[in-house]
Amino acid sequence: MEMNGSQRIEASREEVYAALNDVDILRQCIPGCESIEKTSDTEMNAKVTLRVGPVKASFTGKVTLSDLDPPNGYTISGEGSGGMAGFAKGGAKVDLVPDGDATLLNYTVKAEIGGKIAQLGSRLIDGTAKKLAGDFFARFSEIVGPQPVAEDAEAEEVAAKKGWVGRLRDSL
């Protein structure tokens, strides 16, 4: 399976690169991530539990970073075993391009799966992979990008408490 795409992140290229190497941020962004720990500057161990159709599996594996070119990008590759469910291995080339005050994160992913999970069919697996990538980047953008200004958050909270009756009264 091969998949590519891009995501605009409202942060500098340096901030995005640093976040891509921060295990605490990755733990929050990777769907189903139970644990991730850095074992060296270029290696991590991870445990992820995923559901693909009717199959739920916990994968444990090793992630390696290579072709490091801070803050422009890197190649990330990994291999994991899900016991009887099968295995997954693959990698992604990540390129970070400045886009004004933001960063355009371009990625190309290649993955291979085997075992019971591979028998589910490519359409289900491809759909799940796209959803997982979308979930990762949505959460990553939320964490790394700018947070809402406190005044806006307070105004939204007041409006929510007023409900439709309060808003109707204010509009009269």
Image (tube, rainbow, N blue to C red):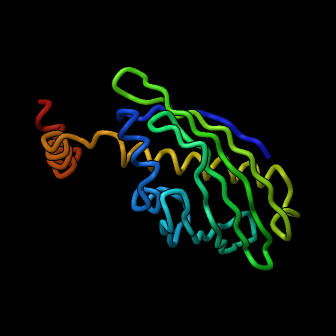
Image quarter hosting the C terminus: top left
Instruction: Looking at the picture, tell me which residue is in the foreground, 157 or 22.
Output: 22
What is the residue that sits farthest to the bottom in this orientation?
84
Between residues 104 and 155, which one lies in front from this camera angle? 104
Would you place residue 48 above or below residue 28 in this image?
A: below
- Number of marks drawn: 0
Q: In this view, does 65 lie to the left or right of 128?
A: left
The answer to whether 101 appears left or right of 158 in the picture is right
**Relative to residue 120, is residue 106 drawn left or right?**
left
Residue 40, given in percent of the width and then of the height, sits at 50, 64
Residue 165 in view: no
Q: In this view, does 158 lie above or below 115?
A: above
Q: Which residue is drawn at 61% across and 53% down?
A: 132
Q: Which residue is drawn at 63% across and 34% down?
A: 5
Estimate the x, y position of residue 133 in percent, counting from the top left: 60, 48
Q: Residue at point 27% right, 43% down? A: 147
User: In x, y percent, where is residue 144?
Assistant: 36, 45
Taking the image as shown, residue 145 lies to the left or right of residue 27, namely left
The answer to which of 34 and 69 lies nearer the viewer is 69
- Residue at left 71%, top 40%? 3
User: From what the image shows, is residue 96 above or below residue 53?
Assistant: above
Task: Give how far across and how far down residue 18 sits, in percent.
Answer: 39, 46
Q: Can residue 59 be seen in this view?
A: yes
